[in-house]
Image (spheres, grey):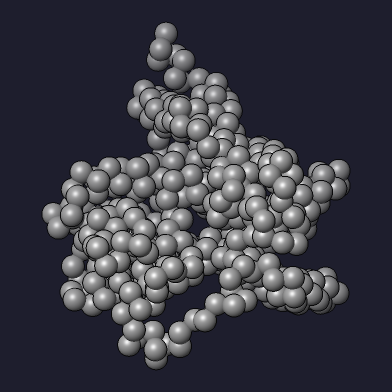
Amino acid sequence: MLKNYFIDKEKISFINLVLLCVLIFVLPIAHTATIRSVAMFTPMLLLFGRYFIAKDFKWIKTSFELPFFAFFLMAIISIFTSVDRHETVKEIWGELIVPILLFYTTYYAIENKNHAFILLKALFIGSLVFSLYSFYDFYQHGGKFFTVVYKAGGLRDPGGGEVAALYHTMVIPFIFWALFYWENTKEKILLFFIFLINLVAFHITFVRAGMLALAFQTVFIIGILLREKKWILSIFLAIILIFTVHLYVEKKMLRELHNEKIPSIKDYIKMSPEEIAGTNPSSMKQRLAMWKTAIEKIAENPFYPHGYGRFLFGKTVRNEKNKHFIYPQTHNTFIGITFELGIQGLVVFLWIIGKFFFVCCKYWYKYKQSIVKYLSVSLITMMIGYWINNFFGSFDGDDSKLLFMMLLGIGMAIMHKTLKEKEFKC
């Protein structure tokens, strides 16, 4: 009986698709750990069970196996020098193994472009619900549209905004490019309104890193449109970008950036972290001081891994002199990875990121199919925003990383796996 159930490919496929829809919907919502776990691990077990019993598994590599394994090896090695081995083992499982498993689960669960579109529609509906709650929360707390009084964080971090801003910069590219590549006119009209709602919800987060990320994404989009000879739209977007930047500066919506005295690179090198932070540091000076602390520690032995795990930084360097500005994490993923795994770990990490971009760019250039073009350019745009955000925060973890790997899995399933399967059939 059980064997017959697992052999029924359509039933397993339907259940997996429903659960992945639930997962992509709830990922940006706080306090959904149980739902998330069920929606994430059940498809993994069902896929494994079906492949094991039916014995119809066909491995189709993704080009990421070698860098994934190399990074995993770096993390394992860091256990032996970690300041907290238990924490490192926990982080390897939660922030490395689980996201990679989710990537492959999504990759193998999606069997055609309709599956991909269903998951993306669940993502878009989720972003609409997330944004509408942001408006409600913003209104309830007396938020002002052109003054930083309250930062809307949607269903993830009300009053915080950082993770919400990152979420919007991950979703917006998929909505924007759908307006060009999706064929259904009614869906395009609906997506246009969801796009505008996401933009407004993003604005009321008032997160500087997110604003910078969206600006870079817009510049990239303008470049793509110019390459495709869409002159009027690209000029229009350039004007909108310039006007928006001017408005943000004029209305002083970049918070303390307007009166912050940032040290020059020459002074920054000479100053101690305590001098950079001062007695009552702003969030920007805290980041600069933490980065300097991490860089100085790395410089003592560039190849020494202090242990994989974002929250080991504070445990390693915090003391009586710096405890007023040292957070548990570095608030910079790239400096953080170097601190955790050494220079060699950073090299492998950059290799993974480079591989992500290279594979997506390859499919964007190579194939003329709308679905391949859509997913590849959406992923590239999304990744630009994701990694810029990660330069100002340690966001490569938790629900953000899971969403990143899920979106990558959706894209690779269509751009790579289904194309490979067609090649095998030929």
59 vs 21: above or below: below
Q: Does the rendering let one see residue 116?
A: no
54 vs 400: above or below: above
In the image, is 110 to the left or to the right of 373? Answer: left
Q: Does the rendering let one see residue 268?
A: yes
Question: In which quarter of the view is residue 55 placed?
Answer: top left
In the image, is 405 to the left or to the right of 194? Answer: left
Outermost residue to the front: 279
Outermost residue to the bottom: 266
Which residue sits at x=39%, y=91%? 266
Q: Nearer the viewer, residue 176 or 202?
A: 202
Outermost residue to the top: 1
209 vs 134: above or below: below
Outermost residue to the left: 80
In the image, is 23 to the left or to the right of 271? Answer: right
Q: How many marks do you count on the picture? A: 0
Which residue sits at x=42%, y=8%? 1
Image location of residue 81, percent across then percent down: 14, 58
Image location of residue 178, percent across then percent down: 73, 53
Which residue sits at x=81%, y=51%? 192
Which residue sits at x=59%, y=44%? 158
304 vs 227: above or below: above
Q: Nearer the viewer, residue 1 or 161?
A: 161
Question: In which quarter of the view is residue 165 placed?
Answer: bottom right
Q: Nearer the viewer, residue 330 or 336?
A: 330
Image location of residue 57, percent across then percent down: 40, 35
In the image, is 110 to the left or to the right of 276? Answer: right
Image location of residue 186, percent across then percent down: 86, 43
